[in-house]
Image (tube, rainbow, N blue to C red):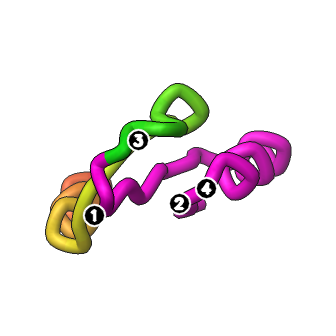
Amino acid sequence: MVGDFRYDLEAGRRAGVATLYYDAAGQDLWTAEADFRVQSHAELSMLLRRARG
């Protein structure tokens, strides 16, 4: 689950799925609530490619 706000990440946790904090502004506000953190589409794309193997 990808989200950019605390409530997004909390919803993902409650649903029992991995959470990814999209922090384009680099504010580092909700990193502790997420399993992963990225700051750009390029970084997200790279993470997804790695996950596919």
Q: Residue furthest top?
A: 32
Q: Are marks 1 and 4 in contact (CB under 8 Å)?
A: no
Cα–Cα gap, marks 1 and 4: 16 Å
Q: Is residue 17 magenta?
A: yes
Q: Residue furthest right?
A: 14
Cα–Cα gap, marks 4 and 3: 13 Å
Percent across and percent down for residue 9 are: 66, 48
Which kind of residue does numbered mark 4 sit on? Phe
Kind of element beneath mark 1? helix
Which kind of residue does numbered mark 1 sit on? Leu
Neighbourhood count class around disc 3 (C-alpha, 10 Å): few under 14, some 14–19, many 20 upward: some
Residue in the picture at 59% in, 60% down: 1
In this rendering, the answer to whether 23 lies above or below 48 is above
Cα–Cα gap, marks 1 and 2: 13 Å
Whether residue 52 is visible: no
Residue indicated by mark 1: 44
In this rendering, the answer to whether 13 lies above or below 53 is above
Kind of element beneath mark 2? loop
Percent across and percent down for residue 31 are: 46, 34
Cα–Cα gap, marks 2 and 4: 4 Å
Kind of element beneath mark 4? loop
Percent across and percent down for residue 32 are: 52, 26
- N-term-proximal mark, 4 vs 3: 4
Residue in the picture at 58% in, 46% down: 18
Residue indicated by mark 4: 5
Residue in the picture at 26% in, 56% down: 39
Which kind of residue does numbered mark 3 sit on? Phe
